[in-house]
Amino acid sequence: MFDVVVVGAGLTGTYAAWQLEKKGMSVQVLESMDRVGGRLFAKQISSTQSIDIGGGWIPGGTKIEKLVTEDLNLETFRSDIQKYPDVWKCPNFLQLISEFPEGVKYPFEAPKEWLNKYDNMTASYWVQHESGENEECKNDLLQFWFVGRADGPYRPDSVSMLNQIWYWRYLLIEVGGKDYYGIRGGLGQVPVLLAQKLKRPVRLSDPVTIISQTNGIATIATLKGKSYKANHVIVSTSAYISGRITYEPPLSWKRNQLNQNKPLGTVAKINIQYLNKFWLDNGGLSGKEGCDTTEYGQWSCVTPENPEEENMLTLCIDATDPNSENGLIVCLIEASQYDLFAARESLEERKEAVLQELATKWGDEALDPIHFEVGDWPANPSTQGCYNSAWPPNVLTRFGSAIIEPHGVIQWANTENTPYFPGETEGCIYAAEEVIKNITGVDIMK
């Protein structure tokens, strides 16, 4: 009998388990994959370079930075990346997010007039018909910022505008302008290190199949026939993945609908290491018009999302550790561009297509990497997508409250249902602290 069973050993789950154990509670973490980390996953590819196959950068002055540098004593390095510079050129969008009412903890709690208007339209519709922005700004929003950077990635014609407002209000107001940092050894090591601090090892490769409740006690059954009893359960997965578990008594109709209507985004993350950073002598990481942010020296699209082009790469980023004498770029393939990537059947065909696309920009040097690693998140049966799950139109209004409503002794915790910084690793920490408060009555958010 445990005080708490945590389902899912990602950042939220391992952080929650660690904090609960520090408060004297007995905790068991269960994980379907053969590793700890969820949508965070790091590898060391040389003595001076790690890669993150999942999330990879953290902003300074945040809870996640404190966890990394103080609690885990990991070394960071300043990245050239400063997220979201071009959105500052869109005054009407900035005005809109600044007008979002204060004191709203979750987007489904927004005033009725906000829900009726902004949850009833797509982000694409707002940009094209309501924003009043100039054409350059509209292109930036539709081709880049609203595709890959808002709880997705999704195409802006499939996401609620309220989703964009909610996401960006934190990223621009709270994080905008702050330095971003890489972590030596990778961000993906953070949940692994947290798991190592736990008194009981995480049980891996054993998916939870049924959670039943009788007289306030939960019984958690796994695919391999294990059974655990607990006073509390934290399901730390995306809403969609949580719906693969059988619940007795059954979930509410609203939670079932939420699980079906909040799909994860489609993205592949490609880490490519070369002997040197030859791109610095070949135009840098500049991109095509509408996606080029080179005046800031950071995020740079190789190709904008354009259905008339057969290009896959949404953007590429220099992710080289300053200690490395080699060069590392990370290329992201997002939204419908992922379809072009996945249409190539073998890994070799996909690798060749990626390198050929880079070679059209940088020449033949791009064809000869020393390391090539693909994070194909939609194909992973335990995640079925990445980075996160967004809110399609009207889902917040109709089913949104179910994302936090407990089901008996079951609490939900992940970066998609956090009250702050949705879709970010910072949101994982806030989500974990929210359920810790619900279980223990102690608020550790301050």
Image (cartoon, grey):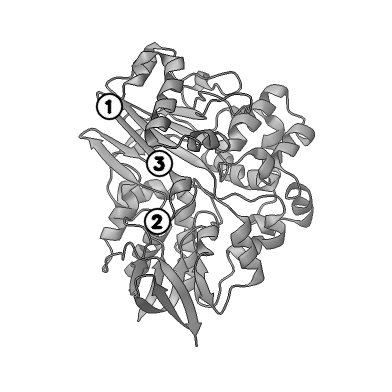
- Name the amino acid type tagged 2: Gly
Residue appearing at x 73%, y 28% in the figure? 133
Give the camera-side residue of 133 and 246: 246
For the point 72% across and 54% down, the residue is: 394
Q: Horizontally, is 34 left or right of 95 in the view?
A: left
- Position of residue 111 measured from the top left corner of the image (x, y, whole percent): 75, 56
Residue holding disc 2: 10
* Quarter of the view holding residue 252: bottom right
Type of amino acid under label 3: Gly
The residue tagged with tag 3: helix, strand or loop?
strand
Left of 412 or right of it: where is 20? Answer: left
At x 59% / y 45%, what residue is drawn? 167
Whole-number angstrom distance, CA of label 1 to CA of label 2 = 30 Å
| Residue 143 versus residue 253 in the image, above or below | above
Residue located farthest toward the front when viewing the structure as drawn: 345
Tell me which corner region of the image, top left, top right, bottom left or bottom right, holds residue 282.
top left
Q: CA distance from mark 3 to mark 2?
A: 16 Å
According to the image, label 1 marks what residue?
Answer: 370
Residue 46 place in picture, x, y as percent: 22, 34
Q: Disc 1 or 3, which lies upstream in sequence? A: 1
Q: Is residue 444 above or below residue 316?
A: below
Q: Which mark is residue 14?
A: none
Q: Secondary structure at mark 1?
A: loop
In the picture, the disc for residue 375 is 3
Q: Is mark 1 in CB contact (under 8 Å) with mark 3?
A: no
